[in-house]
Image (cartoon, rainbow, N blue to C red):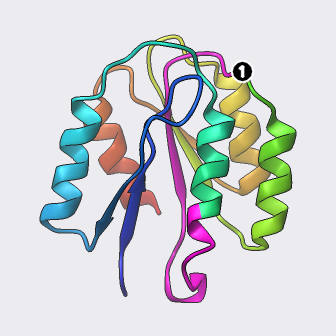
Amino acid sequence: ENEVNILIPFNDGVINTYTAEGNGGELEALYDKVKNQDVGGGTDMYAAAVQGLKMLQEYDLSRYTPAIILLTDGQSGGSISDFESAYEALGAEVPVFSIMFGDADETQLEELAQDTNARVFDGRENLTEAFRNVKGYN
């Protein structure tokens, strides 16, 4: 099965997008990007999740096991209804896992997890380890 990982760092908007094919060196490079992200600015995880859903439209999802993993350290601005509209438009079951760290709002993350049949992971001790756990869970 092919594997594609898309990383979308965000603050109060999407900062960039990175894609890694397979689960070898390119995926390890994504872990490095995660480790080296500057933390700061606002938080709009919904905008990042919507961007992820849009990027998933480019793939034949019957050939993948799609999932979105959010890493967030704060209370999100933005609108969950924007996310819900984009999720319905995608028309596929895509779990949205969250890894919380810092002052992440667990209530918002649990709501996304419930809406999409996923779960929330605690990355406050070790962010990279939490990321690996999500990958193993999916």
User: Is 47 one of the magenta-colored residues?
Assistant: no
Vertical arrangement, residue 27 with respect to residue 92, above or below = above
Relative to 124, is 62 above or below? below
Q: Is residue 109 left or right of residue 3?
A: right
Quick check: 83 left or right of 68? right
Q: Quadrant of residue 116?
A: bottom right
Q: Quadrant of residue 105?
A: top right
State the residue lying farthest toward the left. 25
Amino acid carrying label 1: it is Gly
From the viewer's side, name the closer residue of 58 and 29.
58
Residue density around tag 1, few if under 14, some if 14–19, many if 20 or more, within 10 Å: some
- Please state if 82 lies on the left or on the right of 32 as rendered: right
Q: Position of residue 37 (x, y in %)?
A: 29, 28
User: What residue do we see at 19% from left, 62% from top?
Assistant: 26
Could you say which quadrant of the image residue 89 lies in? bottom right
Is 68 in the magenta? yes
| Residue hosting label 1 | 77
Q: Residue at x 26, y 74 (%)?
A: 22
Q: Secondary structure at mark 1?
A: loop
Please give the name of the residue rendered at 37% of the width and 87% of the height, measured from the top-left corner: 1
Residue 53 coordinates in the image, percent (x, y): 64, 59
Tell me where residue 64 appears, x and y as whole percent: 49, 81
- Residue toward you, 79 or 128: 79
**Which stretch did the figure color magenta?**
55-77
Using the image, determine if residue 118 lies above or below residue 14.
Answer: below
In the rendered view, would you say 66 is above or below 122? below
x 56%, y 63%: residue: 55
Residue 76 horizontal/vertical position (percent): 67, 22
In depth, the one of 34 and 133 nearer the eye is: 34
Query: How many numbered marks, from 0 up?
Result: 1
